[in-house]
Image (cartoon, rainbow, N blue to C red):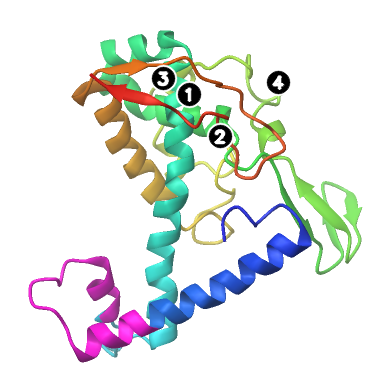
Amino acid sequence: MISGAVTSPIDHVKGISNRNESEKWAKDLIEEARKHPVPGKGNHALYTFAHATNLDGELLPVEVAAVELLNIIRPTVALTVWMALMGHALFANRDVYDALKKDFDNLQDPFIQEMRRYYPFFPMLPAIAVNDVEVDGYLIPKDSWVVLDLYGSNHDERAIKSPEQFDMARYVGKAKDLSYEEEYEMIAQGGGRFRDMHRCAGEWITLHSMRVFSDQLVNAFEFTVSEQDWTIPMNQFPTYPNSKALLFKD
């Protein structure tokens, strides 16, 4: 579902098929959780969504609860890509690691936001215009192919000073605003107001998970980093270092 999003038509169709199969699997889990709940599991994601209600106090339809469950599972799996990229940020060049470790409390969130700007989870996103639409005076005709250049937008020197430099300091004091207030300063996981336009449903899960992982990688353990291929291919979706990120806990 993730790796087939932006590759070939065959992979895309397979991704859709896998999504349908995943939704059926999730529906079976929701139905089983409702019929035969396991005591003491109420705080688990499965039971949270199985027993979730709408504003009228009625249980969510099984189909809706299943999709919401997948909306937790899918970003959690996708986060492994960000963690591989975090390994690159911290250990391909130890300068970032040393600076973050020295002032972790102040730099953790700026580090995470700079990671989301600097690295391309998806370098770009393609789409087809479903209607004629005008953007800044430019007409995009219906049925046209459109490419959103995520990497290029987040590395545009007209908007970002020294975009090819990994600089945590650029987001000191405003890291949280990027995901909660700002609409277009950075479009790592979509743009616009969160409730009105398309931003990734897993954006906040991503932020919190990256906080946990960065704390573990910087403060909880020491690692030996072997020789490896840190190259990040830009024609792979999603993309990450060729060697992933090989760390050996001391």
Badge 2 element:
loop
Residue 152 picture quarter: top right
Are the two marked residues, 3 and 1, in contact with CB atoms closer than 8 angstroms?
Answer: yes
Q: Where does label 3 land, which residue? A: 90
| Residue occupying the point 46% across, 33% down | 84
Are the two marked residues, 2 and 1, in contact with CB atoms closer than 8 angstroms?
Answer: yes
Query: Around disc 2, counting alpha carbons within 10 Å, would you say few (fewer than 14), some (14 to 19), or many (20 or more)?
Result: many
**Which stretch did the figure color magenta?**
28-50
Q: How far apart are the two marked residues, 2 and 1, measured between alpha carbons? A: 9 Å
Badge 3 element:
helix
Q: Which of label 4 and label 3 is nearer to you? A: 3
Q: Where does label 1 land, which residue? A: 88
Q: Which of label 4 and label 1 is nearer to you? A: 1
For badge 1, the amino acid type reads His
Give the main secondary structure, helix, strand or loop, of the magenta stretch: helix
**20 or 165, nearer to the observer:** 20
Badge 1 element:
helix
Vertically, is 90 above or below 6?
above
Q: How far apart are the two marked residues, 3 and 1, measured between alpha carbons? A: 6 Å
Q: Which mark is residue 208?
A: none
- Residue 133 at x, y = what percent? 83, 61
Query: Around disc 1, counting alpha carbons within 10 Å, would you say few (fewer than 14), some (14 to 19), or many (20 or more)?
Result: many
| Residue occupying the point 44% across, 54% down | 75
Are the two marked residues, 2 and 4, in contact with CB atoms closer than 8 angstroms?
Answer: no
Horizontal relation, residue 242 to residue 209: left or right: right
Residue 226 picture quarter: top left
Q: Where does label 4 land, which residue? A: 157
Q: Earlier in the sequence, mark 3 or mark 2?
A: 3
Q: Quadrant of the C terminus?
A: top left
| Residue occupying the point 61% across, 23% down | 231
Q: Earlier in the sequence, mark 2 or mark 4?
A: 4
Horizontal relation, residue 244 to residue 14: left or right: left
